Image (tube, rainbow, N blue to C red):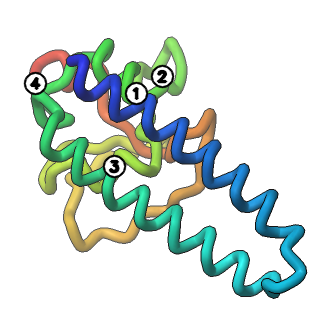
Amino acid sequence: MGNKVEKIMCRVAKRMMNTGARADRIEGDEDLSRAQTESMITQELLENYADIMRQLREHLPKTIPEMNDEELLALGCRYWSEDEPILLIPPWLWPLIPGDTPIRTISGEEFRKSEEDWVDFDTRYGCMAYGLLSEEVDAGG
């Protein structure tokens, strides 16, 4: 997928663990209320998320629909089943998928992604109940 993208993905894990460690330490601070602690941690998570998404937009070598199964699996997509080769999408990857990309739900419904669409971020195996068809991905969308 590219060394730069792999480094970004490693940074995701490191930032999440560092934020968790700070949250654990801050929670014991008697000078801060629980609401203040939660606000600080939420702000840090949102800033990290925005920065990492910016970096991924800059460094992904292809658009999501152009990626093959191996590349999508490296980004955290997961197969729904062997019988139905839908590559489920992790919630954080959804904003990187361009509009008009064909999407299939785990119940078999198909639609094209729209920037205005509201989707349920309920997850299975760490991914949403929405995915890309394996053969569509291999064919480049």
Percent x, y of residue 58: 13, 43
Percent x, y of residue 104: 35, 41
Residue type marked 3: Ile
Q: Are marks 2 and 1 in contact (CB under 8 Å)?
A: yes
Question: In terms of sequence position, does the residue under pointer 2 or pointer 1 come before the other?
Answer: 2
Task: Write down the residue under mark 1.
Answer: 86
Mark 3–mark 2 Cα distance, whole angstroms, equals 24 Å
Mark 1–mark 4 Cα distance, whole angstroms, equals 15 Å
* Rendered position, 73 above or below 88: above
Residue type marked 1: Ile
Mark 1–mark 3 Cα distance, whole angstroms, equals 26 Å
Single out the mark in the foreground, 1 or 4.
4
Task: Write down the residue under mark 2.
Answer: 79
Percent x, y of residue 116: 24, 73
**Mark 2 burial class by Cα count in 10 Å: few <14, some 14-19, many 20+:** many
Mark 4–mark 2 Cα distance, whole angstroms, equals 17 Å
Secondary element at tag 2: strand
Q: Which of 101 and 44 is in front in this view?
A: 44
Q: Are marks 1 and 3 in contact (CB under 8 Å)?
A: no
Question: In terms of sequence position, does the residue under pointer 1 or pointer 3 come before the other?
Answer: 3
